[in-house]
Amino acid sequence: MSTDGIRLGVDIGGTFTDVVLERAGAYYTTKVLTTASAPEEAIMAGIAQVCGESNVELSQISTIIHGTTLATNALIERRGAKTALITTKGFRDVIEMRTESRFEQYDLNLQLPEALIARNHRFVLNERMDASGKVLVPLERTDVEALADFIKQEGYDSVAVGLIHSYLNGAHEQLVREVLLEKIPDLTISLSCEVSPQMREYERFNTVAANAYVKPLMKSYLTRLVGRLKATGITCPVFLMHSGGGIISLESASEFPVRLVESGPAGGAIFAANIAGRYNANRVLSFDMGGTTAKICLIRDQTPKTSRVFEVARTYRFRKGSGMPISIPVIDMVEIGAGGGSLAHVDAMRQIRVGPESAGSEPGPACYQRGGDHAAVTDADLVLGRLDADNFARGTIRLSTDASREALQGDVGEALDMAADTAAFAISEVVDENMANAARVHAVENGEDLSGYTMIAFGGAAPLHAGRLCQKLGIDRMIVPPGAGVGSAIGFLMAPFSFEATRSIYMRMTEFRPAPIKALLKELAEEARAFVRTCDAAAEITCDYKVFMRYAGQGWEIPVELSEQDASNPTASCYREKFEQTYTALFGRTVQGLDIEITSWSVNAATRVDPPAIVSEVQTGRQAAPDGSRELFDPAAGGYGSAGTFQRDHLSPGKSVTGPAIITEAETPIIVPSGFTAVTQSDGCIEVFRDAARKSEGVAA
Amino acid sequence: MSAPSMESVANQVMWNRLISVVEEQAQALVRTAFSTSVREAGDLSAGVYDLEGRMLAQAVTGTPGHVNAMADAVAHFMREIGVQNMYDGDVYITNDPWMGTGHLHDITVVTPSFYKGELVGYFGCTAHVVDIGGRGFGADAHSVYEEGLRIPVMKFAERGEVDLSLVNIVRNNVREADQVVGDIYALAACNEIGHRRLAGMLDEFGLDNLESISAFILEHSHRATVERIAQMPQDVAVNTMDIDGFDKPVHMQVRLEFHDDHADIDFTGTSGVDRKGINVPHVYTKAYACYALKCAIAPEIPNNAASLAPFRVSAPEGSILNAPHPAPVALRHVMGHMIPDVIFGALHKLVPDSAPTEGASSLCNFQVSLRPRSDGNAPPDTTRAEVLMFNSGGTGARPALDGLNATAFPSGVMTMPIEATEHTGPVVIWRKELRPDSGGAGKQRGGLGQYMEIGARDGHEFDFSAMFDRVHHPARGRNGGKNGGATTIGLDDGGAMQGKGRQAVPPGRKVLLALPGGAGYGDPMQRDRELVLRDVERGYISRRSAMKDYGVPEDKLPPERPKTI
């Protein structure tokens, strides 16, 4: 996409709205408090600020790229439209019965989350497709008409349609829409065969329900936003970041608002992918740790890992299964309840537990002295010497080490007979281990081994913990970019226009027929290209082809990437070979004598994004002189020692800092562990290397 | 900082790590498995064991009957194989009901873990496969010999070489050979993942073996469990519950006694071994008895050998809860899943209002064996297939909360998506939705059961293997709460069917199921009026039930929805 002109990235989060203005490669950034009742207000305020700073007239802005948690929050807080779900007779309760399991096996007082659309708002039609997409029971138009009259009478704002096996044949869903629109022309309607054409009824119905639920709200918000922008003279196009890491038009976003869920974190992953590109890092773990949660994402070859299903609104300690599954193309990340505000306690086994309960910003950790008296990760970080009590958050909050010690002693030390220092160390170790475990499990689920990875750390608390995480994960190299606090909004400006078209069509390798495959992939490519074309009339568009394959009889497919050549000239032997290669990489060995099948087909069309300029990396530099020193706890050695402090602003490119050291900046200090060396790079990133690894790779010391 | 406290921090970290390692192990199994019971329903378990065969950690993903039974399994492998005969690259296997997890359909795979050339521990995992030969999954056998292939404890692979003779024997004895053999490979692969992660952990912490971390985990778990038990009244209670059985009722009786450092759970007085396949090997009885008490009094203590040890379970040999070889045991879970209900009843007598009342409890399984219709009218594209489904009724109401609708307690396994099920064979699931009025009335209402309708695609007929209880013995309410709805089963033309056993379904006919509800807790007249009205509005209860069971006057009820919608 064009990167000329003046572009804005706008990210609405739960607490802050971040605005980034980019002009000729330079960034002007601001954070303003989110205005939940009218989110466009904060955007306008933020835009005014960055334009003021950069001397840009509002009318000069050429593009706005926007991501938001509004859809996510509406789902979490259940503030959506009056929505009806229409489904197949016999399946009224699919979204309520979930998987019928319990996400916590040992809690006798477990409560399941309420269905997004309550039972009395779910209606059924007598119709049925079979598992090959053929009609078993035809849908009678008169039945739909009767239901449409009732929907009208009850005054529903939005309707979700989810019918059994509609991912194979959407004809009945389309008929429902046709009749509803005849009777109620201004009704908002979402079809599961369009929103999420994937097998597994619970995930698909839930996804279409979520889409319908937030659609009126998002439509109205986006319309208001464009109106406000126009009124102030900003007439440039507005695009939306989607959860899959690409950009879509305002119209697509209004039609499929569920795709905006998690767009903020997706921007963060794109940001990290861009940094990865600058450093030619092909295996990257992005680590984004804020006040309440940490997010971890794998980035291969500068492309974040994607998935087709994820969960929003987890209701039980971020436990898998306690939220709502949404099956859409999404950047795959794990989110766990581990942030600076996460609270620590000791459980019945005398084990230290950290999170997911968080002190938040109010009352905050004990050291804030704003009424919080429980030990948070930030308290541990303070006692361990990682934070400067007098210089926190640009000096806006003075931290009390005494208050931290008292809380650490009270919440953990007394129960375990540990001094406050040991308790702080233990809390820090537990939270780091939790994050490391999440990263490891995530890596295994993706068939990856983290040694040899580069970590890219951003978000408020990440630079404090990233070094230790590298030690735990056996990672030898990490990068802390500048502007890490508004990483997501910067990421929006780096994303391509993209759209993924998918179909679930089953085909055994023994029944491999090249002609229909070629036609199908061509059709998907055209569909995806057409969407992207609406965003950018001129840009070059490239297509990525992927099929999902498995041994016939397995339930979980693995993505197999195809080349343009494989798509236009498909052969069974090539598809089989690619599957076996991918399967072996994931699970060790192939299974003999079984047929292989393809279950879905996907084509992602995207505008070309110019790769970032490669930074000529400096691995060793001139030793910088410290500004001072303070006592810093060294987890690997298990004790305190003196560490030099350095101001990031003072570190010109090529300067190096040997750990243990603390690099301070306006936001969060970077902890350089012992055995690691930090080197400032020409683009302002700080790169931290494990010394032993540098030597072993023969880098001159 | 003192050395002991540093070591304690390291141990804390490693304990977390081991739990994470076995979770990775379980996820690898789900991703590579073939049977829907494993990949969709999570009927599996995974764990890591020390050199003495003591379980140190289990995956969060998994079902209690497997996990707690598997806690004992490794000791059998050590004895039968002999530690001196174990080599790096070995993989062991069995499906022996008395040494594994209670029936032939569960295959247990154990892999010794070698580190720097020395044996340091074991990884074990279990999964329920779709078929194991014999009569097929169901209650109909009269001895375990009719229930299918029994694989003794033996080597599946030695030094990395798979025993292809064994694979061949399995292939020739089961109905869905690809799925079953594929699942055995998946079990072996998942232990391998666990082993790799363990080696990484030992590297990182500079350890040569699991000795110190094993001692730490077991000591802490034991102490915490005993502390909880010590808080219970040191007293005795007896409780009984009757359930359907195969063709004659089964009487379950438990005597629960708390001592200062352990609990005794004894099933003397329970019915004897049944002639049909609903008997329970002791290992499975123990698994669910431990699970029930652990949920009630020490839920957050991780499962391992030491946290299970203070729960001492006994049942007289020859009783249905301690059935000796060669009793038929295929449906051991139907009785086994009822054990928590009978224990909770006893616990309530010692500590009132500390546990749920009775629920559907037994997982409502059925297996459908489809084939081209046998009257000569089968079209050419018809096939044979075995389709297994897990479904759940409602759970019993809790002292302060309603029961859960259509939720698997105690087993916790997932149902299979019907769209996935219909891809595994020519079956059509016509209905799967909540069953109004099946939750027992109460101040806290029982969870709802569900309706199901099962048929075959045109040109097919099928046998339906039923595995249901609570047809004649619905879940009983507590403190004035009403009973849950009973199970019903029949054909759509009115033909009668039994709750258990393999039954033929003619072409064109459907099986209609109403799965049971959980019972209510407390006097329904005391239920919050708002909740009763909500239940009517949502259709969880009928207007009639609101008036009759909860005393709501008709004019206070929300308006009726038009019949056509």
Image: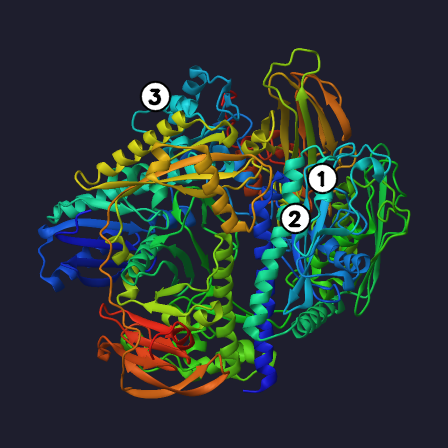
Tell me residue B231's x, y (percent). Answer: 74, 68
User: Above or below — where is A491 with respect to A224?
Assistant: below
Circle 2 Cα neighbour tier, 10 Å, few/some/many (<14 / 14–19 / ≥20) = many
Q: Which residue is mark 1?
A: B168
Q: Which amino acid is tagged 3? A: Lys
Foreground mark, 2 or 1? 1
Q: Which residue is mark 2?
A: B44
Q: Is residue B541 visible?
A: yes
CA distance for labels 3 and 1: 63 Å
User: Above or below — where is B143 with respect to A610?
Assistant: above
The quarter of the picture where residue B424 lies is: top right
Circle 1 Cα neighbour tier, 10 Å, few/some/many (<14 / 14–19 / ≥20) = few
Q: Are marks 3 and 1 on the same chain?
A: no
Quick one: SS at disc 1? helix
Q: Nearer the viewer, residue B196 or B534?
A: B196
Q: Which amino acid is tagged 2? A: Leu
Q: Which residue is mark 3?
A: A183
